[in-house]
Image (cartoon, grey):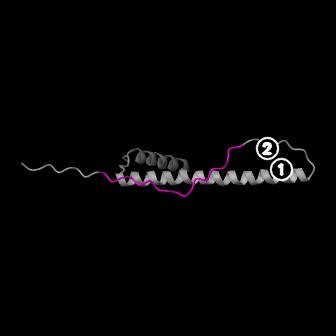
Amino acid sequence: MKRLLLCSALVLAFSAHAKLPAPVLTDEAKAKAAEAAAKTAHGNKVEAYKLCLSMDRAAGNYFKNASTGGKTVKPAQAAPACVDPGPFVPVVAAPAPAAPVAPKP
């Protein structure tokens, strides 16, 4: 009985989902989505920068402690420097030019 109810509920859910129209995005919604994507990308860059700094500190601490402990360690491999992405600057889209008004004859 439970299986029959579950199957019928799933069939109804999938049939209702299949009939929903695709959402229509306005220019404002597209701009908000683009800004959200830009914020996410910037956040990812900031997190990568913080990770790079923490890895540099951990490696420096390891080499310092290993040398004082008498261990022989290989020199560190050359790694690219950590690049600070700076503050987030939202991209402001230029407003669309107004349509020219045709003169009346």
- For the point 28% across and 51% down, the residue is 97
| Of callouts 2 and 1, the N-terminal one | 1
Q: Tell me which corner region of the image, top left, top right, bottom left or bottom right, holds residue 87.
A: bottom right
Q: Residue at x 90, y 44 (%)?
A: 72
Spot occupied by residue 20 in the image (x, y as percentages of width and height): 38, 47
Mark 1 is surrounded, within 10 Å at the Cα level, by few (under 14), some (14 to 19) or many (20 or more) other residues, namely some
Magenta extent: 79-96
Residue farthest toward the left in the current orientation of the protein: 105
Q: Which mark is residue 63?
A: 1
Q: Which amino acid type is shown beneath numbered disc 2?
A: Ala
Near-viewer residue (63 or 44):
63
Which residue type carries mark 1? Phe
| Residue at the extreme bottom | 87
84 and 35: which is toward the camera? 84
Q: Residue at x 82, y 42 (%)?
A: 75
At 93% from the left and 49% from the top, the residue drawn is: 70
The x and y percentages for residue 71 are 91, 47
Q: Which residue is mark 2?
A: 76
Q: Secondary structure at mark 2?
A: loop
Left or right, 105 with respect to 85, comes to: left
Residue 61 rendering spot, x and y as whole percentages: 81, 54
| 93 in magenta | yes
Q: Residue furthest right?
A: 70
